Image (spheres, grey):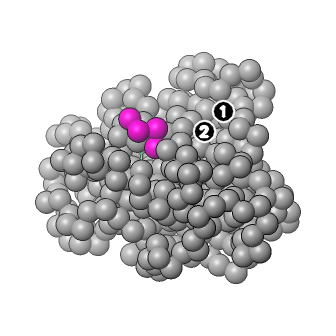
Amino acid sequence: MRRRDFIRTSSLALPVVHSIKKDDPSAEFPVVVSTWDFGKAANAAAWKILSAGGKAIDAIETGARVTEADQSNKTVGVGGYPDRDGHVTLDACIMDEHGNCGSVMCLEDIMHPISVARKVMEKTPHVILVGQGALQFALQNGFTRQNLLTPDSEAAWKEWLKKANYKPVINIENSSYQQTPSTDHFPGSIDNHDTIGILALDASRNLSGGCTTSGMAFKMHGRVGDSPVIGAGLFVDNEVGAATSTGVGEEVIKCVGSHLVVELMRQGFTAPKACKKAVERIAQRNPQKAREIQIGFLALDKQGNYGAYALQNGFTYSVKTKDKEMVVESDYHFTIRPR
Ligand code: ASP
């Protein structure tokens, strides 16, 4: 399915709760939600675990691995666009219902950073491993080394090198933008960022989340965005809810975005309203910059209510429950696209 083949919903149509009720009969769970339309395949894999009564944390890892292994996806895992020096460097994090978390940053040559992040969470006293240390840990734990730079991504990088103009492109899957692609950005009109953030509430009503990405295409070597930063790209609080983000990570880090969304839900905002408030915070802080970038938040509360909000149009998310399998277009802040 392409991103324009979505179901458009209003946040008003989503279930609304203003307080966390422990036994809300309208609660729908298990449920799994994930960023973008490519989240649909991840959700399907996660659903197999959730529908069999499995744990959210297992569903998260299984779902994220689907996207990481998809070579056609240029923004996550194998086949992800490299940095400006030609290295594919991956970032991922995972968080469970107990508040345990693990993260890897700038990991090379390993296809499944989400699984390495889980091992960091479960087998070390640490939360984050980076670069060579993360690779060493992965190899010691049975992961195999492989070249993640596919011929397609290498060709796109070589094309980019001709101009070497580093500028994030707002989710260019938006159809009106596709009609007038800017050649100032990335020749060939390629999508240069997008992440899978995935959140699940299991049959035991426990929440977990994960986030995995190759980050900004053609970024500076060593650059890490929000995705593997606990609190920025992902946050899970089993009392309240979980949130994840996609888009220009630097701006998400500056407001500790996913933690902000969860804390807003704790204050009583619904999942979509909490995402909206966080986006508005970013837009208010630097209105000019906010017009030039995309950021989207996705949240899932303890009842199984979910919602999203983005700076610009074009952000979609995927949902899977017992009765639903859909891609939803998020509401957004700016009604006029930047030119
Ligand atoms: N948030 C990711 C990063 O900044 C990229 C994205 O989701 O678009 O690395």
Q: Which residues are magenta?
A: 254-258
> In the image, what residue occupies the spot 58% across and 74% down?
15
- Image quarter where ligand 1 lies: top left
Please report the residue visible at 55 percent of the width from the left and 46 percent of the height from the top: 263
Taking depth in this image into account, of 65 and 17 the one nearest to the observer is 17
Q: In this rendering, would 96 be left or right of 105?
A: right
- Residue 114: percent from left, percent from top: 64, 41
Amino acid at circle 2:
Cys
Mark 1: amino acid: Gly
- Residue 72 appears in view: no
Secondary structure at badge 1 equals strand
109 left or right of 73?
Answer: right
Badge 1 local density, few (<14 within 10 Å), some, or many (20+)? many
Image location of residue 178, percent across then percent down: 25, 68
Residue that numbered label 2 is attached to: 93
- Specify the principal SS of the magenta part: helix
- Sequence order check: which comes first, mark 1 or mark 2? 2
| Image coordinates for residue 12, horizontal then vertical, percent | 47, 76
Asked if ligand 1 lies within 8 A of label 1, the reply is: no
Can the viewer see residue 278? yes
Q: CA distance from mark 1 to mark 2?
A: 6 Å
Quadrant in the rendering for residue 338: bottom left
Location of mark 1 (residue)? 102
